């Protein structure tokens, strides 16, 4: 039986446009169930797709602190989230839920 070679899937390699990045973040927000570290990881995926060094500069953060904040291992502060979202050229919006 022959072995099949596989490679690790990296979503950052498939996020090419602002629209794809926004759609990915929107999907992650819907799936997060209040898990802030999940959202941080999604923002990290988008930042890697866009270029972590440039995002760090645009957000006014060091590259190292940006990697730590968006690793998914912890929940970054909301101010950091807002800086990163702005640096990514994205914006948050609110929508009423219908219960």
Image (cartoon, rainbow, N blue to C red):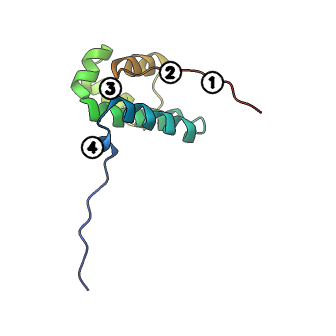
Q: Where is residue 72 in the image (x, y as percent from the top left)?
A: 42, 37
Dot placed on the residue nearer the N-terminal end, 1 or 3: 3
Residue position marked by numbered label 4 in the rendering: 13
Q: Where on the picture, by quarter, is residue 53?
A: top left
Q: What element carries label 3?
A: helix
Q: On the image, numbered disc 3 is attached to which residue?
A: 66
Disc 4 to disc 3, how far (Cα)? 19 Å
Of pointers 4 and 1, the one earlier in the residue sequence: 4
* Label disc, if present, on residue 95 of the rendered structure: 1
Residue at 31% from the left image edge and 24% from the top image edge: 65
Q: Residue 20 carries which label?
A: none
Horizontal placement of 86 versus 38: left or right?
left
Q: Which of marks 4 and 3 is in front?
A: 4
Q: What residue is rendered at 32% in x and 39% in y? A: 15
Name the secondary structure under disc 1. Answer: loop
Q: Do the residues labelled 1 and 3 touch (CB within 8 Å)?
A: no
Cβ atoms under marks 3 and 2 closer than 8 Å: no
Q: Name the residue under label 2.
A: 92
Dot placed on the residue nearer the N-terminal end, 4 or 2:
4
Q: Residue 89: x, y in percent?
A: 36, 20
Q: From what the image shows, is residue 47 above or below residue 7?
A: above
> Mark 3 or mark 2, which is nearer to you?
2
Mark-to-mark CA distance, 1 and 3: 28 Å
CA distance separating discs 2 and 1: 10 Å
Q: Is mark 2 on a helix, strand or loop?
A: loop
Eyeballing the image, is 59 above or below 13? above
């Amino acid at each position: 039986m022959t072995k099949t070679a596989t490679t690790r899937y990296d979503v950052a390699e498939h996020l090419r446009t602002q629209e794809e990045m926004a759609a990915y973040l929107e999907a992650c927000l819907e799936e997060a169930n209040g898990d802030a570290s999940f959202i941080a990881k999604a923002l990290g995926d988008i930042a890697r797709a866009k270029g972590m060094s440039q995002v760090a500069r645009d957000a006014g953060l060091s590259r190292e602190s940006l990697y730590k904040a968006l690793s998914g291992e912890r929940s970054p502060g909301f101010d950091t989230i807002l800086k990163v979202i702005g640096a990514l050229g994205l914006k948050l919006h609110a929508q009423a839920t219908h219960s």
